[in-house]
Image (tube, rainbow, N blue to C red):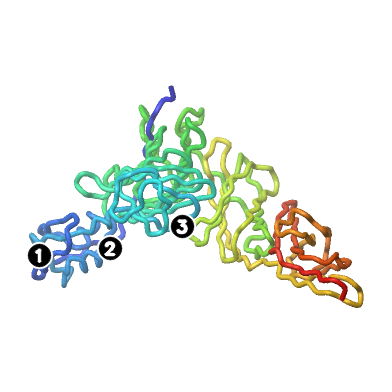
């Protein structure tokens, strides 16, 4: 039977702001009920909002909801109302097959098994799962962000403790998790933000970190900013500072704080990616067993578009992504140790123009030929295909190895045909292909 253990990670926070102060205005009619707070002497709207929502900067919404005229003049004994939806996680971005496996029913929220989309709200107890090439980023009530990449599952155990104070617990059940926890303006409790796995619990108080489950017996922790504390059963907590990592579980390296592998150096960063596939290259990192490459539509990697995990090959490393739509993107890559600890990140941005194979066909009566032409794809070799069916199962012409954007063929027997062009680009040994649309071609009788 597999032993089940749990690990906790904790982060250290910085003080950011000091509270507002003051007395109050006359009480106004109350909004619809959610949960409430009765104002006590010395409390400010800033402090009360931080206590209930974890984010003091949300105080203007609380002021508006409760019709508070002057936020520095809170009346002692006044009852403030909070919308319970403010105490749920919200989906910031979702790509592909992202579902709520189970959890509490929420009025107007997604039912269990439903695909999640940006704006979906998730209560405590929700369990999320991402499929292949699928990603989701959540904002939790305390303002922290958590991203689940492909093939991951996590349970949002809780956002608040029994007294209503922010106390996040996320259980990673498979795959990976990346979180950004903002520093708090006060000394947080020891369990203010935790990630639990079978092998350990990670306690967090303001940091950027990753947790992954490379195999059933181990959890890998990487700290990109600040520090975390890793607690394994029957062991003293281990502090893992910035740019360090740790493996927890059955590995001989378990419990040893290690340097994260350095960020890989990009080759030709920022070059336009207008070929059929997006090709990224970087120099290999000594000690890497694999690499984790991600594409996102934003610089903070909230809205992930694609990712790959590639074995280390030595020397120059390559990742080829097909099916990436035109637009502006950001790429990042991390070297991963053979045990699964991800290293420091290297980022680069790139643009991607619309790649297309627009074309025309015309009859050259004086030559008795059909002339085909199409738009250029940089660095491509082309194949012209003509078929008598739209699915291109019965080819009448297949002319490959074309270096230019034009080809001529002898006249075909009368009939209805379809034609298209395939563009192949080989860059640094990686092949990508763009297939143009099928276009009708009517060949009539003697002209």
Give the CA separation, mark 2 to mark 3: 21 Å
Secondary structure of the residue carrying numbered label 2: helix
* Front-most of residues 136 and 394: 394
Residue lying at the far front of the rendered structure = 445
Residue lying at the far right of the rendered structure = 367
- Mark 1 or mark 3, which has the lower sequence index? 1
Give the left or right position of residue 260, taking residue 170 as reference: right
Q: State which quadrant residue 8 falls in.
A: top left
- Whole-percent x, y for residue 362 in the image: 80, 74
Residue lying at the far top of the rendered structure = 1
Q: Are marks 2 and 3 in contact (CB under 8 Å)?
A: no
The reply to whether residue 347 is in sight is yes
Secondary structure of the residue carrying numbered label 3: loop
Instruction: Give the answer, above or below, for where 229 lies relative to 360.
Output: above
Residue at (66%, 56%) from the top-left corner? 279
Which numbered marker is on residue 75? 1
Residue at (50%, 43%) from the top-left corner? 151
- Residue picked out by circle 2: 58
Give the CA separation, mark 1 to mark 2: 20 Å
* Front-most of residues 86 and 347: 86
* Front-most of residues 349 and 390: 390
- Residue picked out by circle 3: 302
Give the left or right position of residue 384, taking residue 34 as reference: right
The reply to whether residue 10 is in sight is no
- Quadrant that contains the N terminus: top left
């Amino acid at each position: 039977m597999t032993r089940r253990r749990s690990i906790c990670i904790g982060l250290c926070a910085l003080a950011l702001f000091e509270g507002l102060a003051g007395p109050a205005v006359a009480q106004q009619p109350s909004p619809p009920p959610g949960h409430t707070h009765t104002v006590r002497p010395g409390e400010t709207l800033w402090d009360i909002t931080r206590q209930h929502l974890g984010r003091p900067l949300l105080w203007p919404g609380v002021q508006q909801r409760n019709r508070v005229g002057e936020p520095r003049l809170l009346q002692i004994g006044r009852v403030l109302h909070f919308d319970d939806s403010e105490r749920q996680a919200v989906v910031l971005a979702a790509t592909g097959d992202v579902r709520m496996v189970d959890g509490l029913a929420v009025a107007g929220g997604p039912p269990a098994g439903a695909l999640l989309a940006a704006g979906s709200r998730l209560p405590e107890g929700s369990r999320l799962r991402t499929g292949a090439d699928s990603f989701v980023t959540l904002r939790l009530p305390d303002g922290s962000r958590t991203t689940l990449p492909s093939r991951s599952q996590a349970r949002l155990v809780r956002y608040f403790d029994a007294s209503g104070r922010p106390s996040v617990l996320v259980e990673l059940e498979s795959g990976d998790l990346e979180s950004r926890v903002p520093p708090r303006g006060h000394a947080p409790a020891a369990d203010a933000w935790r990630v639990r796995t079978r092998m350990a619990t990670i306690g967090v108080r303001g940091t950027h970190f990753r947790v992954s489950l490379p195999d059933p017996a181990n959890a890998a922790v990487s700290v990109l900013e600040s520090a975390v504390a890793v607690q394994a059963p029957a062991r003293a907590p281990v502090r893992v500072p910035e740019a360090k990592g740790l493996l927890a579980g059955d590995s001989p390296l378990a419990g040893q704080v290690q340097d994260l592998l350095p960020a890989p150096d990009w080759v030709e960063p920022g070059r336009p990616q207008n070929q059929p596939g997006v090709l990224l290259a970087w120099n290999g990192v000594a000690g890497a067993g694999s690499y984790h490459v991600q594409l996102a539509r934003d610089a903070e990697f909230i809205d992930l578009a694609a990712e790959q995990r590639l074995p280390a090959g030595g020397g120059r490393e390559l990742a080829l992504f097909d099916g990436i739509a035109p637009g502006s993107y950001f790429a990042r890559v991390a070297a991963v140790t053979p045990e699964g600890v991800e290293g420091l990140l290297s980022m680069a941005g790139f643009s991607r123009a619309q790649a297309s194979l627009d074309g025309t066909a015309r009859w050259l009566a004086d030559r008795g030929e059909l002339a085909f032409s199409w738009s250029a794809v940089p660095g491509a070799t082309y194949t012209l295909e003509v078929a008598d069916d739209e699915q291109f199962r019965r080819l009448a012409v297949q002319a490959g190895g074309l270096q230019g954007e034009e080809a001529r063929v002898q006249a075909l027997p009368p009939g209805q045909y379809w034609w298209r062009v395939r563009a192949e680009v080989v860059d640094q040994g990686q092949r990508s292909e763009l297939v143009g649309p099928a276009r009708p071609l009517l060949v009539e009788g003697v002209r």
